[in-house]
Image: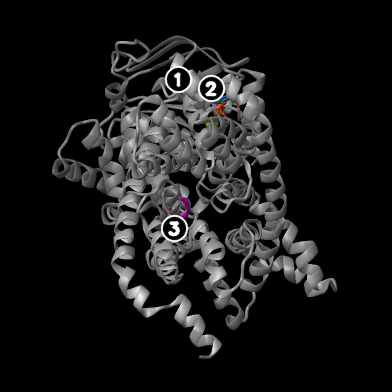
Amino acid sequence: MTGWDRFAETFFNAKVMAKYLPDILYGMVVTIELAVLIILSGLFAGLVLALIRSLGVRPLNWLIIFIVDLFRSLPPLVIIVLIYFGLPAAGASPSGFVSTWISLALVLMAFAEEIFWAGITSVPRGQWEAARSTGLSFVQTLLEVVLPQALRLTIAPLTNRTIAITKGTALGTVVAVTEILGQASSAMSNSYNPSPLMMGATAYLVLFLPVVVAARWIETRFAWKR
Amino acid sequence: MEEMIQAFFNADIARAAMPIVLAGLLNTLLMSLLVVPLGLMGGLALALGAHSRHPLVRWPLMAWVDFFRAFPPLVLLVLLFAGLPFAGLELGGFACVAIAFFLNTGAYYGEILRAGIESIPHGQVEAARSTGLSRLQTTTYIVLPQAVRNVLPDLLSNTLEVVKLTSLGSVVAVPELLYQARQAQSVTYNATPIVMAAVIYFLILWPLVRLLSRLENRALAGRG
Amino acid sequence: MIVSAKDIHKHFGALHVLKGVDLDVAERELVFVIGPSGSGKSTLLRCLNRLERPTSGSVRVDGIDMLAPSTDINHARQRIGMVFQSFNLYPHMTALGNVTLALRKVAGKSRAEADVLGQAALERVGLADRASHRPAELSGGQQQRVAIARAIALEPRVMLFDEPTSALDPELVGSVLAVMRSLRESGMTMIVVSHEMGFARAAADRVVFMDDGLIVEQGPPAAIFEHPTHERTRAFIGQIQRH
Ligand SMILES: Nc1ncnc2c1ncn2[C@@H]1O[C@H](COP(=O)(O)OP(=O)(O)O)[C@@H](O)[C@H]1O
Ligand SMILES: [Mg+2]
């Protein structure tokens, strides 16, 4: 056997790969579920916080800024571990899946709030004044005039941030979530063979590479111009 | 309430765990001091290459960057730590972290620096070359300083992410802050050490987050 | 009086910008406001539709107390249109979209009704054929005329113009002034801050000169331009006529 054959036999072992393919595919489904939940809840919560912040109620804004800063400062893995291993002491025992979902959604919420807020404040004051001068209310102006312009500015940075945070679903493996990396790791230790890990790595590329390439396109398409 | 305090803010446990946790903090700082310059150097090489006019240089480097942007850093780390031994190559957890971060954060730094370099108008290069500066001198003295200034918020933001990312070291038994805290937690069956780690992360990173939030708001507002 | 502002004071922090301004405007009158930069002209206009809240004083527009807490300010603002120096068109909407937004959201018209009214307003400013264009596809003069259409579509009783031609290239100024003149001929009450002295001579009933937060003097255009009584007025008019 040549060195290459041995390498292929070890890292791309057909028998092992065939055996654990269903596990990896299942892991992909879990990863996708987790990712969709994180993106929906994180972006929604971030947008709501940014909208509340635009109301300009001082104490409320301080609270929002603190929450945002907190979840921007803490490593996601620390939040996951804290929720998964810590919360049971407070009487709640969230599963690894839920812990990962909540943690990453909070992190995405924090980053999204910052980005949405920066977008809202970047809309010129004249837009507010023009809309208010025709009788639109604060909320109507915010929703009809300001937000559509702000969102356009936020698309590129939001996409990049969302990808980076969604990749964090792999952290779920630390708290026994059966996502791709978790499935791949346990398959590897069951088979004493790294092929499942190679499959897992490929699965991530299959999921995320198209998104990264799309983000590149979005970045040029929605570049900062009006 | 009393129970909550006992579970999360237990003073006795905090006192006992303090040396362990602080040792972890030291390692986290050392790791960051190693990994950030490493990533920056890799990123600079990528950015200069990706800026090249030669497509045979540019495209592979862009693909490299996208590859590592698509790849979760933890997967990379596990691949190095648990996969390489099967090829007869056993690296320690620390070396694995260093390599994985060099690849991962290098790609991010590279993408940021490339955008910075591309933001410099070509007239700057032409002006510098017309005064007799070499290509390398032009890059070093004219292009890079302006490029870095233009993307400083993004560079700082990525640096924040890198420091946070060092917590992945805990997965491969590098005794950094989170690892040490989890050790203390599993011995005491109490979440206080992890709360301590969280507080420490927050205290050392909050100033950077504050600064970033200001810079980012200004950057975005300027483009409206 | 359709507009009646009494003893308006406005402070921005320590800065005293309006120092007791009285302004009454009769129906169908065109009042032209001039004065050096920073004298408080914009602030005065913005106090009239409450984009700025005066620190003290009273403002009535078409019988409505604009400063009373019980006043539905959004409803009241339909009666007092405003045109800005920088147009402030909504860049993400078409010309027609710009004109119909408040018709639908404030006046409560259906989309179909609003489109008909909006199209008619664009017709009045000579831009019926630009209804589906975005602001970025229009010249500065066209953008400002859309902005005027946006205001008049709500059928206001009064129109405020804050330097409507200052941001325009000289060759585009005429088209905007023409629209303002036709608006004037239709009997609209107008308060105009501008440097277009030719327009003032031709169309204004009264010229008001402001300086340092106060109305220094006012009167018919001929009187103010040819025989200003105050030294400051004379200096200002001499200055702009030299340009
Ligand atoms: N929102 C504001 N905050 C602080 N100062 C302001 C504000 N708006 C206007 N000012 C100040 O009020 C003064 C009058 O401004 P303005 O009414 O715009 O003058 P004009 O339109 O006559 O040039 C100026 O000194 C200006 O700097
Ligand atoms: Mg002004």
- Numbered disc total: 3
Residue A194 shown left or right of residue B140 in the figure: left
Residue A119 in percent (x, y) is at 46, 42
Residue at numbered disc 3: A222
Residue at numbered disc 2: B9
Q: Which residues, given as a range, are shown in magenta?
A: A160-165
Residue type highlighted by circle 3 = Phe
Residue at 83% x, 71% y is B133
Residue A58 in percent (x, y) is at 48, 20
Residue C127 in percent (x, y) is at 30, 52
Q: How is the image coloured?
A: one colour
Q: Quadrant of ligand 1?
A: top right
Can I make out residue A165 in this image? yes
Chain ID at mark 1: B
Q: Is residue A163 magenta?
A: yes
Residue at numbered disc 1: B4
Residue at 57% x, 41% y is B178
Residue type highlighted by circle 2 = Phe
Residue at 27% x, 56% y is C129
Q: How much space separates mark 2 and mark 1, taking CA atoms?
A: 8 Å
Say whether mark 3 and mark 2 are on the same chain: no
Label 2 Cα crowd, 10 Å radius (few <14 / some 14-19 / many 20+) = some
Mark 2 or mark 1, which has the lower sequence index? 1
